[in-house]
Image: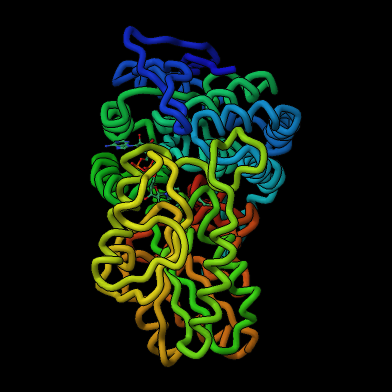
Amino acid sequence: MFKEAMYINGEWVSASEMIDVRNPADGTVIGQIPFGGEKEAQQAVDAAWNAFPGWSALTADERGKLMRRWYELIEEHTDELAKIMTTEQGKPLKEAAGEIAYANSFIGWYAEEGKRVYGETIPASSPNKRILVTKQPVGVTAAITPWNFPASMVTRKAAPALAAGCTIVIKPSEETPYTALKLAELAHEAGIPAGVINIVTGDSSKIGAAWQADSRVRKLSFTGSTAVGKKLMEGAAQTLKKLSLELGGHAPLIVTANADLDKAAEGVILSKFRNAGQTCVCTNRVYVHESVAETLSSKVADLAGKLKVGSGLEQGTEIGPLINEKAAQKVRRQIEDAVQKGGIVLTGEQPGQEQEGPYVRPTVITNVHDDMLCMNEETFGPLTPITTFKTVEEAVERANDSSYGLAAYVFTEHLGEAVRIAEALEYGIVGVNDPLPSTAQAPFGGFKESGLGREGGHFGIEEFLEIKYISLGL
Ligand SMILES: NC(=O)c1ccc[n+]([C@@H]2O[C@H](COP(=O)([O-])OP(=O)(O)OC[C@H]3O[C@@H](n4cnc5c(N)ncnc54)[C@H](O)[C@@H]3O)[C@@H](O)[C@H]2O)c1
Ligand SMILES: O=C[C@H](O)CS(=O)(=O)O
């Protein structure tokens, strides 16, 4: 089931050292991957460099056809890909299959979008000149991706890159390499030429450093924590690479007095507990108007308490294990801190109670205050802190008081209030009565320290293009 090799220049390559990959559900070793480093990183760039002229010389239509075939093979192998993902990442099988479809939607979207990379002509100020503006692929690109979405974080970069005519070297997370390797296997089967896509596994620092220093790599696209993103931004400056950074989040969710409370409670559950709370756009903080706080909180606690916790491979599981014990302990530390500061646990884990390793029960805490860890630090787990507000202005001010600016949510049935709040929130993505805004045709990305650039939609392909203007002297 697991490809235990790197994919470089159309070949499956090993390394002298191998490292274990574990199943988060029980900590067992499910396989190994090569512990590649600088040499393999270099070989991958060599392959991408040599493949670039041929790939970029194809028409967008020819590239689109190969991408379409890749899309069809991924669709045919959804069950196998989902099983691989759940085994290495832990999310419930149903969610894994959903992610495969989401990941594939980027390939489907960009297989077509590549044909719409339009230029323009500009009226020249001189009668003897003509100005043509064209766009061309940046060249060899590098992508470094996280463990929480092992498929979609890869295709959200590879799809626009390939459609634009770029080639790509990818380093998936060492926690979840097998999904990316399977995607590469299917790309190979689809006929995408050797060197166009390359997957290197292993020493993230050495591989990252090699790609940052290599002037042939013209673009670095990273998804992961803000801390690592800042390091990579520094490194990319060595050769002034184009940069896309999709980083951490700390999403506020505002429920006004005009909200439909059933819709809002359902929205909290969907936005908070997807992937056991391990998404960059998960609700991290709930702000509810004081007049409806008690009703909203009990609805959320009631729904959260019914969520089934277990192994992602078990039928009916809704909340899988967190990626590892360390991640679970971080969530438990936030729960403990909140309770010590007066928080009230309505459902879920009480400090001091029996803990179940990486399985954290969906937890809802009220009587929350802004000085608690969970209101300031990305949780990345199934914890919902609920705090109250008196005025919408206060809620927006507190929601914006963060170094993050990725996603935010507002629930209200009052249109004017919805528009005013959405416009005032300093976030790149705002869900108005919509807890699941992410989609291939829209620009995904954040303000402030949540990142640079956008992925998805026509914005996403621009990140892999250079603009050239040709001045014709007549
Ligand atoms: N904005 C988004 O779209 C988005 C999506 C998913 C996850 N995230 C963020 O990612 C974080 C969780 O994912 P994670 O734990 O994998 O993040 P991480 O930053 O620890 O790791 C992300 C990737 O970077 C690699 N990496 C780590 N240190 C590196 C270095 N020095 N040089 C090169 N590569 C290095 C890792 O091996 C992994 O492949 C959270 O903060 C989450 O918010 C953001
Ligand atoms: O964790 C980050 C992902 O980008 C979340 S989503 O699946 O794109 O919403």
Q: Is residue 2 left or right of residue 323?
A: right
Image point (48%, 33%), residue name: 25
Pick out the residue farthest to the front. 353
Vertical placement of residue 322 versus 367, above or below: above
Compare residues 449 and 435 and report the one nearer the observer: 435
Can residue 451 be seen by looking at this rendering?
A: no
| Image spot of residue 351 (x, y percent) | 31, 56
Q: Position of residue 374 (x, y in %)?
A: 33, 63
Residue 260 visible? The answer is yes
Residue 291 as seen in the image, left or right of residue 68 = left
Residue 210 left/right relative to 263:
left
Image coordinates of residue 10 in percent, x first then y, are 55, 15
Q: Quadrant of residue 204?
A: top left
**Front in this rendered view, residue 122 or 447:** 447
At horizontal 41% and vertical 27% (from top left) the residue drawn is: 27
Left or right: where 1 falls relative to 332: right
Q: Which residue corresponds to the image point at 56% horizontal and 32% vertical from the top-left?
A: 85
Quadrant position of the N terminus in the picture: top right
Query: In the figure, 299 relative to 249: above or below?
Result: below
Q: Nearer the viewer, residue 211 or 180?
A: 180
Q: Looking at the image, which residue is at 47% across and 40% down? A: 321
Q: Quadrant of residue 142?
A: top left
Residue 224: x %, y % from top left: 38, 46
**Image quadrant in which the C terminus is located:** bottom right
Depth order, front residue of 452/367 = 367
Check the image and report above or below for 383 versus 264. Answer: above
